[in-house]
Every structure is written in C-alpha cells, then in structure tokens.
Image (cartoon, rainbow, N blue to C red):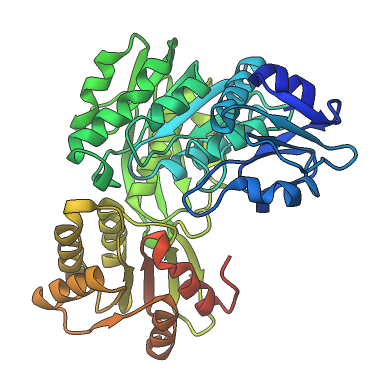
C-alpha cells in the first residue's frame, strides 16, 4: 500500500485531522507491531480498547484510524482519520487495496495443515514470480487484512491463509480477497468446534469462501476427504483433486522418518521425483496440495520438485533439532488438534530409539474435548515409551487413558516450564522427543529451555 491519509479517508469515508499528505505504506491492529509508515487501526477489544494506544502508535507510525473524537492532536507529519466504524473501514481499505493491485490471489483454508500448505505454496511460486504471503498465524479477519495492506509494491501473487473461529468469518475474508484465483482446501477436521454445530457446521463454514472464487479460477480439494465432495458442485470454476484417485498424486513414496520423504510427484501435465526434507508422510500430502495449486498458477512438475528440495519445516511446526546430549527433538509446539497430534504420534512411533511424547492439552474442542484427549492418550500408549501430559483436567484424562492402554511411564505435569525441568532430567542419548500442544499451553517454552534459548 502507498496512500496518503487523504486517499485513505476518501476510500473509507473518513475525515482527516493533521497532515493529510502523510504517506502510509502498511497497516496494523496491534500497536506493538506498528512500524514507520504504518496506519494503526484502533479497535475495541475484549480486554482493552485500541484507542488507548493511539498516542503511542503515532509516535512510530504515520497515522491512526479511529472512531472516537479525541483531544489528542497528531504530532507534526502525522494524521488521524476518523470513521464511524474502524473495523468496517479497515476491511474496506484492504478490499480496495486488493482490487487496486490486481494480484493473483491464492487462498488456503482447512482445519489442519493450512499454514504449512500456504508456506509451501509461497515457496514454490516465489521461485518463479514476485510472491507475497500472510505470515505466522495472521489468518483472521484482524490479521490477514494487515498482511494484505503491507505487501511490497512488486508483489504479483499473494498467498493468503484463511482461518476462522466462528461462522461468517471466512465470508468476510472472501469479500476482501475476491476474486480468488486459486482456492485450496486441506483436510477438514473437528477443530475449534465449540463455536460450531459439530463437524458439519465446520464444513458449511469452510464453504463460505466458495462464492468468492473466480469462475475462471481453480478449486483444489482433497480427494481423500469426502466432506469436500460437495464443494466441487458449488462452483463453476475448474476443480483439481489431489490424493489417491485424484488429478495429482504421490507414487512410490519412501518414508525416511525424521529425514523426510522421497516420492514421485504426479501433477496435471507432468511428473517429477521429489526429495522432501520435512518429516512425516502428512508433509508429503501438504506438498501435494501446494503442488496442485502451483500447477494452477503455471508451475511445472520439474519446477515444483526443484523448489521442494529447499523446503524446511517452519519454526514450531515439526522442525527437527539434534540436542547436544545426543537426543533428537521434534518441535511441533505451535498448535494442536486431534488429527494433527495423531499424525505426529504416527511419525514418532516409526522413529528409532526411546520415544518420548510431551503432549499439551488441546483447546477449543467443545463437547469433543474429553473424548479427543482420551483417544490421543490411547494412541500415545502405542507410540512412545514415556509420556509427559502437560496441563490440568484434560491433560489428566490424556494421561489416564495412556495408563489404561498399558503405558507405564506416564507423568502429569502442570505447565510448560515444569515439563522442561522434568524432561531435562530424563533425556539420554538416542532419545526422540515430540513436543506438541495447543498454543495456550506454551510448549514453545519447553522447546526453548531444551535448546538453551529464550522463547520467542
């Protein structure tokens, strides 16, 4: 984005106080993230009101988008833009910027794997064209518009991760991103179910992006997920299916455990041999989803395979570390859902050496909470020799289920810091340790302690 305060006011129907000519090159809703040139959007929150931070944000940024009249006079070279509804204005500004830039937009959604697929796709496409992407977990109606408004001028393709926690949120993102040139679905699973009418409610909500797909674009769906079959009939766009029986497939897969996988990648228009240095068969599936979308964006099988050799797991998303004492640490502490934990436990079960699972509680599962933790506990009993269950009531259910399934070495620990202390006393050369849990558990602190670092 490169707009003056006056340009923004005209776009969103606001009024400017201060320097109307100040140039704005990005946007933020978190005052702690504001950089020089940013527009700070002051939004009311559950815990505090963004208007409290306008003065601090203006000390760094170029302008602030506000609702309430304020006695604060913007500093020289700064501006205040007053609107009736800052959130609606923020969304309209992002929508207008997307329309003005004319990028090709690829959106990635689903319940598990969407961040990885987004990162993989951005890496593949970025080898060929100037590509921007949403970063970290900024996939919501608050975070994603800021990412869109802060892209470099040379961007041609924008890869957007679209997440949700309640019905209606993907429709909001779809209105901002439209027309979506490529829409990619990973697997749909019972994640964040407390705000939905069970799994079917999640399926309906994920479908909110479909009306925003360009009829001349491409829908990419998982052939192994029967819940996505109806999506193909809800759009006039081209449909590509990935997975067994689909338009894109993996053949002759060799699972090399923590060293990744090797396989033949078959996509529309060609095939090529791939070496993926990211652990887990599920990561090969994530690459397949990204590769299928990549072909819709003009990539060849050879270009995809060449770029895939450089892929590494993102921080806290399955990254492998070799500890000084001779143990191997698999850091997947970013987040957790029943499906994602099950996949990582399968990977752990195939590893050599003594296998240790450090599993934090899984949040936002609603009525499925108790059953999901019992199932994970039972699987952990089949996958490891030592289990550390981290948390309170749900962690206790997980631990009890593991003991009931026959695992003798089970410890219940209260938090991430205690887990680090307990694990530090137990580790020995040759151990393989999986660390995974919902973000709120804070298992990144456990990882940081084992690595001798500060948690990010």
Front-lying residue, 3 or 200: 3
- The answer to whether residue 323 is above or below residue 11 is below
Tell whether 416 sits left or right of 76: left
Residue 377, given in percent of the width and then of the height, sits at 19, 68
Residue 182, given in percent of the width and then of the height, sits at 45, 22
Residue 73 position by quadrant? top right
Q: Which part of the image, by quadrant, shows the C terminus?
A: bottom right
Residue 46 in sight in this render: yes
Q: Residue furthest bottom?
A: 425
Q: Residue furthest right?
A: 76
- The structure residue drawn at horizontal position 68% and vertical position 23%, both measured from the top left corner, is 14
Front-lying residue, 250 or 348: 348
Q: Which part of the image, by quadrant, shows the N terminus?
A: top right
Residue 178, given in percent of the width and then of the height, sits at 50, 18
Residue 353, given in percent of the width and then of the height, sits at 33, 77
- The structure residue drawn at horizontal position 16% and vertical position 61%, both measured from the top left corner, is 370
- The structure residue drawn at horizontal position 28% and vertical position 62%, both measured from the top left corner, is 345
Front-lying residue, 63 or 69: 69
Task: Tally the numbered discs.
Answer: 0
Residue 248 position by quadrant? top left
- The answer to whether residue 232 is above or below residue 77 is above
- The answer to whether residue 368 is above or below residue 131 is below
Residue 3 in sight in this render: no
Front-lying residue, 138 or 4: 4
Tell whether 238 sits left or right of 16: left
């Amino acid at each position: 984005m490169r707009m003056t305060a006056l340009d923004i006011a005209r776009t969103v129907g606001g009024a400017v106080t201060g320097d109307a000519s100040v140039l704005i090159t990005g946007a933020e809703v978190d005052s702690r993230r504001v950089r020089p040139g940013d527009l700070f959007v002051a939004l009311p929150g559950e815990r505090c009101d963004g208007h409290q931070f306008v003065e601090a944000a203006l000390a760094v940024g170029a302008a602030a988008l506000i609702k309430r009249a304020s006695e604060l006079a913007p500093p020289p070279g700064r501006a205040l833009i007053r609107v009736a509804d800052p959130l609606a204005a923020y969304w309209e500004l992002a929508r207008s910027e997307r329309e003005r830039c004319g990028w090709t937009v690829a959106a990635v959604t689903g319940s598990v794997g969407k961040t990885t697929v987004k990162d993989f796709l951005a890496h593949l496409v970025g080898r060929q064209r100037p590509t921007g992407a949403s970063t970290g977990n900024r996939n919501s109606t608050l975070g994603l518009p800021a990412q869109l408004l802060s892209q470099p001028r040379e961007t041609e393709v924008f890869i957007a991760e679209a997440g949700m926690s309640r019905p209606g949120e993907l429709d909001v993102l779809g209105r901002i991103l439209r027309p979506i040139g490529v829409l990619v679905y990973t697997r749909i699973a019972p994640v964040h179910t407390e705000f939905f009418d069970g799994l079917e409610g999640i399926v309906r909500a994920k479908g909110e992006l479909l009306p925003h797909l360009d009829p001349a674009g491409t829908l990419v769906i998982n052939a192994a997920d029967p819940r996505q079959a109806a999506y193909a009939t809800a759009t006039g766009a081209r449909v590509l299916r990935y997975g067994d029986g689909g338009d894109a497939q993996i053949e002759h897969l060799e699972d090399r455990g923590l060293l990744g996988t090797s396989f033949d990648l078959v996509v529309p228009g060609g095939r090529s041999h791939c070496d993926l240095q990211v652990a887990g068969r599920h990561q090969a599936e994530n690459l397949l989803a990204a590769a299928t979308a990549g072909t819709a964006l003009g990539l060849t099988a050879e270009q995809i395979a060449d770029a895939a050799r450089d892929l590494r797991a993102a921080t806290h998303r399955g990254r492998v570390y070799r500890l000084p004492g001779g143990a191997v640490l698999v850091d997947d502490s970013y987040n957790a859902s029943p499906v994602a934990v099950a996949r990582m436990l399968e990977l752990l079960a195939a590893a050599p050496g003594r296998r240790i699972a450090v599993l934090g509680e899984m949040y936002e599962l609603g009525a499925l909470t108790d059953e999901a933790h019992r199932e994970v506990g039972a699987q952990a009993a089949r996958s490891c020799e030592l289990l550390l269950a981290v948390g309170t009531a749900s962690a206790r259910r997980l631990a009890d289920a593991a003991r009931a399934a026959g695992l003798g070495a089970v410890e219940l620990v209260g938090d991430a810091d205690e887990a680090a202390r307990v694990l530090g006393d137990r580790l020995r050369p040759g151990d393989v340790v999986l660390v995974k849990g919902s973000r709120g558990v804070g298992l990144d602190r456990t990882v940081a302690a084992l690595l001798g670092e500060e948690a990010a």
